[in-house]
Amino acid sequence: MSEYQLWLQSNGIDDSHILAINFEERESSRFTIWQDVYDYIVARLAGDGMRYVFLDEVQTLHNFEKLVDALYVTKNIDLYITGSNAYLLSSELGTLLTGRYITINLHPFSFAEYITAYGDKANADRLFRQYMNTSCFPEAVNLSLSSPDMVNNYLKALYETVVVKDIVKRNKLRKFDTLQHIVNFLFDSVGSVVSPNNIADTLRKTSTENLSHNTVQKYLRFFTESYLIYPVRLYYIKGKRLLSSNYKYYVVDLGLRNILQMNNPISDLGHKLENVVYFELLRRGGEVFAGQTDNGEVDFVVMKPNGERVYYQVAYTANDEKTLKRELSSLKKIRDSYPKYLLTTDFETSNIEGIQRLNVIDWLLESNN
């Protein structure tokens, strides 16, 4: 039972007002048409007061959107649908259920959750290096605690499910090699500014395939709709406007990146750290952009719902004077009074001309977040 269902019970909601159906369970196989499910739910939850309905893996039911529509207009039903398949989570859902739903996307474990799973907060530094070099999917973490040799097998199977089932089959793609080349390029370019044109140009030099800008753009859409990668638009800070052509991309889980490439635990730490910070900023709320100045970059600009902005620069280490000066330079040129942070793995914390330098592990574990 989900945490929310338990919460409802603990707050006085009677069990007779809560109904959960998992369409992947054997007892649910008797439902073949959506009308039967609707009749079952309405009969099962007869009575006054709000009724709470939870439908898990609902996309496996043919015409599930008709069931959702019918329940939506039924009085006193609070409806929750969940699923792990990209079909349910993609933009197609917006077409099927226009204006009648709120999406809550679940991310892999944050570092705070990761530490809780291991129960070893005293060794946060060691676990953080592990966090950047392994998977933070909940099931992968569970396997690492019980059967560590199975983690890579799980990640490979998960990748195959996302790529082959959710992308290749759904979009009727014929050129799997093309897809794989683009994925490898994106995974290798985490945190770098790229465009469909430079992806196509680079891949044309390393393969015999004549890739076009439009082909790359199409594949990028497939990857983002399947939540394999997350695109981040560029925001021109001085002009206060979005730039349309180039993006940065981050991978949903660094463990997936590592199974496709020869992972060196001590290499590319800056981009791995940037990937970690990006997803933490998503969890904390607001729109996340990559900042662009006239002669430099700010890794992240977060637009808060109240209109305020927060700037973040990320570096694995900035202990030497030259690196510190470089990392601070773009932040110093921003002429507004919104908060500015430099996040590193260094132990030193200080305020430098209004820029707060923080240890990234402490920042990730802040109790008020």
Image (cartoon, grey):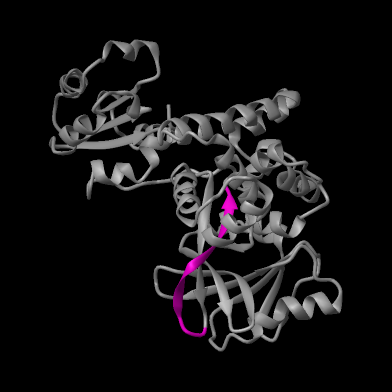
In this view, the residue in front, 120 or 82, is 82
367 over 48 or under it: above or below:
below
Q: Residue at coordinates 69% horizontally, 86% vertically from top-left?
A: 353
In this view, the residue in front, 149 or 158, is 158
Determine if residue 365 is in view. Answer: no
Q: Is residue 3 left or right of residue 136?
A: left
Give coordinates of residue 152: x percent, y percent: 70, 29
Q: Is residue 121 left or right of residue 77?
A: right
Image-quadrant location for residue 201: bottom right
Does residue 294 show up magenta in the picture?
A: no
Q: Residue at coordinates 76% horizontally, 55% vertically from top-left?
A: 268
337 over 138 or under it: above or below:
below
Give coordinates of residue 344: x percent, y percent: 74, 65
Task: Tell me the magenta residue range.
Answer: 238-251
127 over 312 or under it: above or below:
above
Image-quadrant location for residue 44: top left
